[in-house]
Image: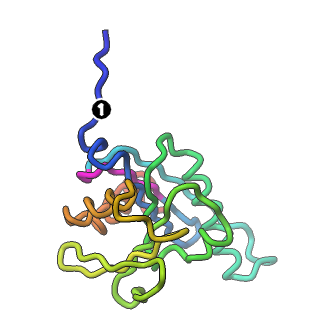
Amino acid sequence: MSVPFKDAAELDAGGTAAFLRILRGDPSRGALFQVNARGAPVEFTYNRVDLPSAALWRPEQLEREAAKALAASLFEAARRTPLVLLCLAAEVDAALFSEDLEVQIPVCRVAVGEDALPNAASSERADSDDVTAHLFWRPALPSAESPPRRLVTALTSRGLLLEPFERALAGLDEALGGA
């Protein structure tokens, strides 16, 4: 007989946050790492995409199509639906989610350092582990009471706004051997 249960960390915020990494190159590699509100791993999905011959492609178009194909493959392979998708602004161009792919959950592009451009209408500032980041939301900044925003706030307060991106990279390196 099974005992019905729910993970308390997922109940806190209502679900998981997915951290997307897209590393350009040939092959392009990517990972989708989902964590709960306490930062515990829940799901890890990874893939790589070999770039087609560059003879007929403009270089920037080839990279954009590779990022689109890689992100789509990761989203299709994921078994869970997260509350929010986080990605690094330095790795993921805003056009991926404004022109190329339409996702049904809030997307939060995280920018630190030179990538941070404050004062956009759908942005906010977040301080996590002595690092100031700017969060750019798509399609719009969720209300403070919404589950996606509460989850990001919980992760930030625990110093987990940027750290899961590093774990995703470590998992990707282990899974694909740096290929």
For the point 37% across and 46% down, which residue is it? 15
Q: Nearer the viewer, residue 158 or 175?
A: 158
Q: Nearer the viewer, residue 20 or 120?
A: 120
> As shown in the figure, which amino acid type bears the numbered disc 1?
Lys
Give the farthest residue toward the right.
56
For the point 28% across and 17% down, which residue is it? 3
For the point 49% across and 64% down, which residue is it? 107
In the image, 3: left or right of 79? left
Q: Nearer the viewer, residue 82 or 162?
A: 82
Where in the figure is residue 178, as x and y percent of width and height?
Answer: 43, 62
Q: Is residue 65 magenta?
A: no
Give the farthest residue toward the top.
1
Q: Secondary structure at mark 1?
A: loop
- When the figure is inspected, residue 9 is found, relative to residue 20, above or below; the finding is above
In the image, 154: left or right of 82? left
Where in the figure is residue 95, as x and y percent of width and height?
Answer: 62, 75
Q: Nearer the viewer, residue 154 or 133?
A: 154
Q: To which quarter of the image does residue 8 belong?
A: top left
Magenta segment, which residues?
31-39
Q: Which residue is under mark 1?
A: 6
For the point 44% across and 65% down, which residue is it? 142
Where in the figure is residue 45, as x and y percent of width and height?
Answer: 47, 49
Q: Is residue 35 magenta?
A: yes
